Image (cartoon, rainbow, N blue to C red):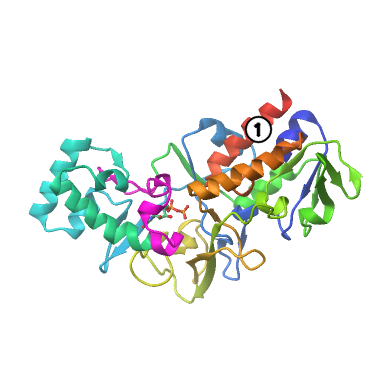
């Protein structure tokens, strides 16, 4: 938003950032091993939107990269999303063949079917397979990640990782998949590198902003510009209707004195350990290092002040609560809400870039 406003309108923008760095959760930096690590968890840019990819390309070159994930299932590492090769690796050949034929007949080769759709399809063979994948891939991972069973979370969440009826072993199948060649921080740094943009780090919104009586106040004076708020909306309004729940992650990095630890960028452990997955960053960004850096993600509840709000936990109840906060926001004509926290949505990186581009267009209409 800052980049668009500065470069397209020539208006001044002040970016107020609570952390001591730019880039939000995309922030990456080189660690002691000289390896580029994603400090807030692995971020892989994938999109079908040419507009998003073109827009970002103005600020970075790309390293072509196709993300691959393995799932550790009863000691065997199989491709995730669960595909026809995963099936062959876990089932006896004749059974695997029969299930494969059945699935292809029913859904068509190459289709991507959400697990929750497979579960109640009515065909006993397919339901047998669905039940297996549900128990081995989704149930325990989702319990760890969300503290809830797959049936109790928004179906869109598990549908992000469908059952794939092909041998395509990539985690995403979008048209554009890449990583900024020198990282997200550098890319976002270039976006902000404009004479109209000023940056104020280490500053929480409540140190400089006050919202009262339909008016926005900035450092004690009434502010007449637009306020684009990307933080937690419940926090902005003093938790008036209670907290909007989030899941968080305890992100534990480990540096090892070995060239490589695992054969894929990410290995998921649905059923073992308290963490959900291990990412080895060298797979994302090659590094001339004889050491390697890993990240284990331990999901937990978000507690304000203690950890980061990463994933909105949307249920009918939390959506209703969010609507209440939106009502409060509507009292402020110049307040614009954008982002995972402000909109309480599970946006991917490409979703939020597109959303920002659209909001900017609406803003100037
Ligand atoms: N999921 C799962 N098992 C897996 C991978 C994903 O149950 O091995 C479910 C889980 O509920 C997770 C959701 O699918 O929260 C989305 O996974 P994704 O990898 O897209 O999550 P993210 O990378 O955004 O954390």
Which residue is tagged 1?
359
Residue 307 in view: yes
Q: How many numbered marks appear?
A: 1
Say left or right for 282 vs 181.
left
State the extent of the magenta-drawn residues as a range. 142-171
- Residue pictured at 33% horizontal, 59% vertical: 139
- Residue pictured at 63% horizontal, 36% vertical: 356
Rendered position, 134 above or below 58: below
Say left or right for 269 vs 316.
left
- Residue pictured at 58% horizontal, 66% vertical: 34
Residue 68 in view: no
**Where residue 196 appears, x then y in whole percent?**
82, 39
Q: Camera-side residue: 338 or 177?
A: 338
State which image quarter holds ligand 1.
bottom left
Q: In the current view of this chain or complex, which residue is farthest to the top?
A: 365
Q: Is residue 169 magenta?
A: yes
Q: Quadrant of the N terminus?
A: top right
Q: Residues within 10 Å of mark 1 (few under 14, many from 20)?
A: some
Q: In the current view of this chain or complex, which residue is farthest to the left?
A: 94
**Where residue 218 appears, x then y in whole percent?**
86, 47
């Amino acid at each position: 938003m800052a980049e668009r406003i500065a470069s397209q309108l020539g208006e001044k923008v002040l970016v107020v950032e609570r952390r001591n760095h730019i880039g939000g959760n995309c922030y990456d930096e080189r660690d002691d091993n000289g390896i580029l690590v994603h400090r807030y968890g692995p971020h892989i840019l994938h999109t079908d939107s040419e507009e998003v990819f073109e827009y970002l390309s103005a600020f970075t070159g790309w390293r072509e990269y196709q993300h691959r994930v393995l799932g550790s299932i009863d000691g065997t590492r199989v491709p995730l999303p669960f595909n026809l090769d995963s099936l062959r690796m876990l089932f006896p050949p004749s059974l695997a063949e029969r299930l494969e034929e059945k699935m292809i007949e029913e859904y068509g080769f190459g289709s991507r079917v959400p697990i929750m759709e497979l579960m109640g399809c009515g065909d006993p063979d397919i339901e047998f397979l669905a039940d297996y994948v549900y128990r081995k891939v989704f149930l325990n991972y989702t319990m760890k990640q969300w503290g809830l069973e797959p049936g109790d979370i928004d179906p869109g969440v598990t549908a992000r990782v469908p059952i794939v009826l092909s041998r395509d072993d990539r985690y995403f199948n979008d048209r554009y998949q890449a990583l900024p060649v020198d990282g997200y921080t550098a890319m976002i740094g270039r976006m902000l590198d404009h004479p109209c943009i000023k940056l104020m780090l280490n500053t929480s919104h409540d140190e400089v902003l006050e919202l009262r009586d339909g008016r926005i106040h900035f450092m004690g004076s009434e502010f007449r510009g637009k306020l684009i708020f990307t933080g937690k909306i419940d926090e902005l309004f003093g938790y008036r209707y209670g907290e909007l729940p989030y899941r968080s992650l305890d992100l534990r990095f480990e540096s090892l004195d070995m060239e490589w630890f695992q054969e894929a960028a990410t290995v998921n452990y649905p059923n073992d350990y308290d963490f959900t997955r291990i990412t080895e960053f060298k797979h994302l960004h090659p590094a001339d290092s004889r050491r390697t850096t890993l990240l284990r993600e331990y999901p937990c509840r978000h507690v304000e002040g203690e950890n980061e709000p990463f994933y909105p936990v949307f249920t009918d109840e939390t959506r209703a609560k969010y609507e209440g906060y939106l009502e409060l926001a509507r009292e402020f004509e110049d307040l614009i809400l954008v982002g995972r926290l402000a909109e309480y949505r599970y946006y991917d990186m490409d979703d939020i870039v597109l959303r920002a581009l659209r909001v900017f267009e609406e803003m100037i209409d």
